[in-house]
Structures are given as C-alpha cells and as structure tokens.
Image (cartoon, helix red, strand yellow):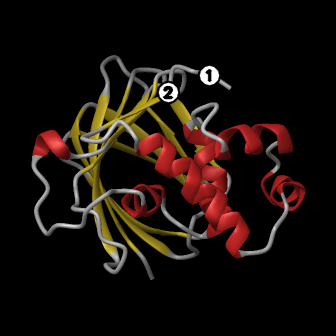
Amino acid sequence: MGQSEEVVGHDNRLELRLAARLAELRTERAWSLEDLAQRTGISRSTLSRVERAEISPTTALLGKLCATYQLTMSRLLAEVEPALSPLVRADRQTVWRDDDAGITRRSVSPPSAGLRGEVIEVTLRPGADIAYDGSPAPGLEHHVWILDGALEITVDGTAHEARTGDCLRFRLWDSSRWHCPGPGPARYALTIILP
C-alpha cells in the first residue's frame, strides 16, 4: 500500500476523522476486523492500520470499503467534513489524491449526508487504469461529462469511449473500469445520484 496518497483540504485532520469513521462503520455493523477482511478481501492488518490512521487508504481500497458499506466515496468524505454549508468555496473543497493510481478527485458539492446527488471533478493521468469491483449502491446513477481529454469507461462489461464535450449517462449495477488512454490527462465532471 503506497504512502503517496494524501487528502488535501481545509482541515489537515481529515485523515484522522476518516479513519475514525471507517472504524465506526465497522462497529455499527458489529463486524470484527476479520469479518470485514472476509467481506472486502483486504487483509485484517491493513484494515487495522487504516482505522488507526497509520496509513492512508488507496483509492482501490477505499472503493472496496465503500462498496461493502454501500456508500459512495464522496459521501464517505462528506461524512467526515467538519461543517455542513450550502456553499463551499473552491479553495475549501476536499481533494483526494492517489499518486500511485494516477487519480485526483475533488468533491465539488458541499458536504451533506441528507442529499442524494453530488458532483465530483476527477483527473486521471495518461495511462491511469482504475477498476472497481462493484457499485457502492446498486443502481447508482452516473453522469460523466468529459471536460478535457479522452476516457474509456467500461460499465458492467460494456466499453464506452468518450472525448472532450461528450457525456455518458448510466446506472451502475456491478463493476466499472476507468482508463485514460492519453496522450494527455482526462478531466471530467462526475455527477452521481443515489437510487
């Protein structure tokens, strides 16, 4: 697990709150670390270190945890934000970066646990190839608007090629794969809506 990933935002304690929230989610379900390891395929020791904020979770690891808890990654990050406001300034938006995977995610929508939709800005470096085993919530609606570059998106086994200005809309029931073929980075706005 790489240490290059970081969470950057208006509060440097975000990682500590994220670790605590992940531990709470497990405890709320009365799962042991071993139970969670079996459900996610992530080792017990890694889960323990993540919950104690000894290491930062990779995008793939966080994706598996979110799928297990049936939360979107942005929703999870919103739950650990310190204050809820209907307006979030650009310089106060939470950015999640996984340099090893080549992804940067900016939570554009103001944090709110009670709303069903959210907007995320994502940048993938050329060659980035990220796969998610399942949807965090079955039937999660996605709108992917390509702001710059090219993106190959595979949804439930069907591949789509999108370029600047294109928009792909789908409901995710199973796996997805997000690949930036290059030559430059792919930057896109992702709107997700809980069913």
Mark 2 → mark 1, Cα distance in angstroms:
7 Å
| Label 2 neighbour load within 10 Å: few <14, some 14-19, many 20+ | many
Q: Residue at x 64, y 32 (%)?
A: 54
Q: Is residue 38 above or below residue 178?
A: below
**x and y, in percent, of residue 93 in the image:** 22, 46
Q: Quadrant of the C terminus?
A: bottom left
> On the rendered structure, is 139 left or right of 35?
left
Q: Quadrant of the N terminus?
A: top right
Q: Is residue 172 above or below residue 55?
A: below
**x and y, in percent, of residue 78 in the image:** 37, 60
- Residue extending farthest to the top is 183
**x and y, in percent, of residue 81 in the image:** 34, 56
- Type of amino acid at the residue the image marks with label 2: Glu
Task: Specify whether residue 174 is in view.
Answer: no
Residue 12 or 65: which is nearer the viewer? Answer: 12
Marks 2 & 1, CB-CB < 8 Å contact: yes
SS label for mark 1: loop
> On the rendered structure, is 103 left or right of 186?
right
Q: Is residue 60 above or below residue 142?
A: above
**x and y, in percent, of residue 10 in the image:** 24, 41
Q: Tally the marks.
A: 2
- Identify the mark at residue 2; answer none if there is no mark: 1
| Label 1 neighbour load within 10 Å: few <14, some 14-19, many 20+ | few
> On the rendered structure, is 91 left or right of 97?
left
Which residue is disc 2 drawn over? Answer: 5
Q: Residue at x 41, y 44 (%)?
A: 14
Q: Is residue 92 above or below residue 169?
A: above
- Type of amino acid at the residue the image marks with label 1: Gly
SS label for mark 2: loop
Residue 140 or 15: which is nearer the viewer? Answer: 15
Q: Residue at x 23, y 60 (%)?
A: 109
